[in-house]
Amino acid sequence: MAENAPPRFLLIVTGSTLRAEQMDRPLAYYLKRRAEEALEAFRNADLADYEVHVVADFRWIHDDSLQGMATISLGGPGVNELTHRWLEEVPVALAVNERYFIQMDPALDEPRASVWGMDNPTTQIAVSVFLDRFLPRLLERCATVPPASLESDDDGDSESDE
């Protein structure tokens, strides 16, 4: 990574519902840890500047600067608005007995994936399969994504009230 090059981000997006916060957010942090381990294992200078972050679906949807970044949407369309939006937009790469799904463009024109199941246990299975079969390809694609600029989203507001 160049000295002052901006970092690049791989975002893991979870739902904002109470159920998603309870069930999917811990799974997202597991996926984050495994993605960070995979990034380290690559030992590839093209991936050395990647940071993995977990964010809420509505944050991703309403922050244009996040939408150009590599993204994994985690959790079903009933609890994650991004997964719901991508349901018809992102091709299905794997569907098993209509119980869990991995959506990802085979050509990876855009580095994004949606990983979900019909319930939390099947979402856990989907994450495991994604880690083994799809994450390496997504990370290889990430190596070719230029850094996106992050614009401040605080609109100049300070945290102190005077």
Image: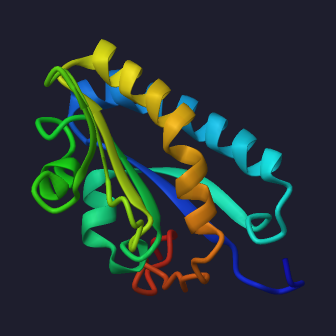
The quarter of the displayed image where residue 91 is located: bottom left
Which of the pair 137/123 is nearer the observer?
A: 137
Residue 53 in picture, x, y percent from top left = 55, 52
The answer to whether 41 is drawn above or below residue 155 in the figure is above
126 on left or right of 48: left
At 43% from the left and 59% from the top, the residue drawn is 71
Residue 116 in picture, x, y percent from top left = 28, 33
In the rendered image, the quadrant that contains the N terminus is: bottom right
The residue at the far top in this view is 121
Which of the pair 157/101 is nearer the observer?
A: 101
Residue 138 in picture, x, y percent from top left = 53, 56
The answer to whether 105 is drawn above or below residue 84 in the figure is below
The quarter of the displayed image where residue 94 is located: top left
The residue at the far front in this view is 107
Which of the pair 130/24 is nearer the observer?
A: 130
The answer to whether 13 is drawn above or below residue 125 in the figure is below
At 48% from the left and 56% from the top, the residue drawn is 11
At 57% from the left and 77% from the top, the residue drawn is 145
At 39% from the left and 60% from the top, the residue drawn is 112
Residue 125 in picture, x, y percent from top left = 39, 19
